[in-house]
Amino acid sequence: MGDAHLEPMEANIKDYVALATAANGQIRALAVVNTDIVDEVRHRHQMWPVATAALGRTMAATAMLGAMQKGKEKVTVQIIGDGPLEQIIADADGEGNLRGYVQNPHVDVPNAEQSKLNVKKAIGAGHLWVIRDLGLGEPYRGGVPLVSGEIAEDFANYFARSEQTPSAVALGVLVGVDYRVRASGGLILQLLPDASEGIAIMLEHMVKDLPPISKLIDSGSTPEEIIEQAIGELQPKYLHRLPLRFTCSCSRKRCESALIALGVAELEALIKEQGEAELTCRFCQEQYRFTKEELEALRAQIHRDQPTQ
Ligand code: ZN
């Protein structure tokens, strides 16, 4: 802990990813706290607890996947199930930008045993997709069928099957009685190619003995402290600390492009039938309003750009 080359943190940023290696480079470890960001999304979408738990876990894993990328390289996670949540989307990049949403934020399913939120039931059967956009044209897309629907195991299965990297994944969200997020975060431990079998077995036991991630975070643990709790005896070396922020890439310009992409006929119909347009960003709930005059200007722009239409 406390390696000299770690970037200094702004005192108020609690949400960040810590990245380390351990056991002389045989293990890669990532841990994240994303409590404040998940609570911001919860507030923006007025989410109910089981949706918050599912999204918080997905965003924790996505933030760690993002921290494995370089700079603006983006990773998108999509979980599509036949349960009432329908779809969970999150994306992150190597600069710490993170966002996400669930298709249906107002979902309620009976709790699982010990009054745990039943994320599995809310998601149902389906697939987990990971899309990595390295900015080199066609993004890389890998997916696996959901094996548990509790998300952590599904990511472990994804790493093993799609990326051939044996991994232990723990994710946890604690939602308060007031629906606020008390704790959210996760841990990923991966065996690197030259890991010995002894290390693999040791790791399995260490992860089994770890208290629930949400409890650790609720009691104030930082990402580094989560890694210490899990694999402290394997001498983790901290490489990188990535502060996270909720950022959305939506803009009025992008909405204009979307309206223009509708084409002249659709735009004409919109002007005639509605007389205005209101677009809402699915990620951040920001609303963009367009008056009749603004829509007509966009229509005129299509005519200018494609005079044959
Ligand atoms: Zn947005």
Image (cartoon, rainbow, N blue to C red):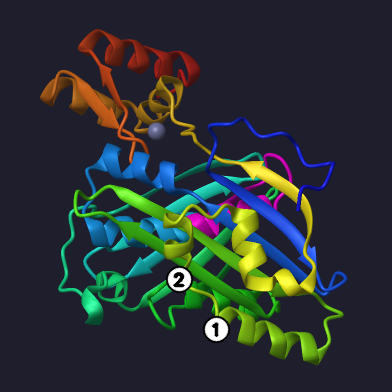
Q: Residue 154: percent from the left, percent from the top?
A: 48, 76
Q: Which residues are magenta?
A: 60-76
Residue furthest to the left in view is 273
Based on the picture, tell me whether residue 16 belongs to the magenta stretch: no
Residue furthest to the front in view is 219
Q: Residue 144: percent from the left, percent from the top?
A: 51, 77
Q: Is residue 210 left or right of residue 176?
A: right
The residue under label 1 is 208
Work out whether residue 293 or residue 219 is closer to the camera in this orientation and state it.
219
Q: Which mark is residue 282?
A: none
The residue under label 2 is 212
Residue at screen point 70% across, 79% down = 164
Which quadrant of the view contains residue 302? top left
- Crowd tier of the residue under label 2, counting other residues whose Cα lies within 10 Å: few below 14, some 14–19, many 20 or above: some
Q: Secondary structure at mark 1?
A: helix
Q: Is residue 136 visible?
A: no
Amino acid under label 2?
A: Pro
Q: Is residue 140 left or right of residue 253?
A: right
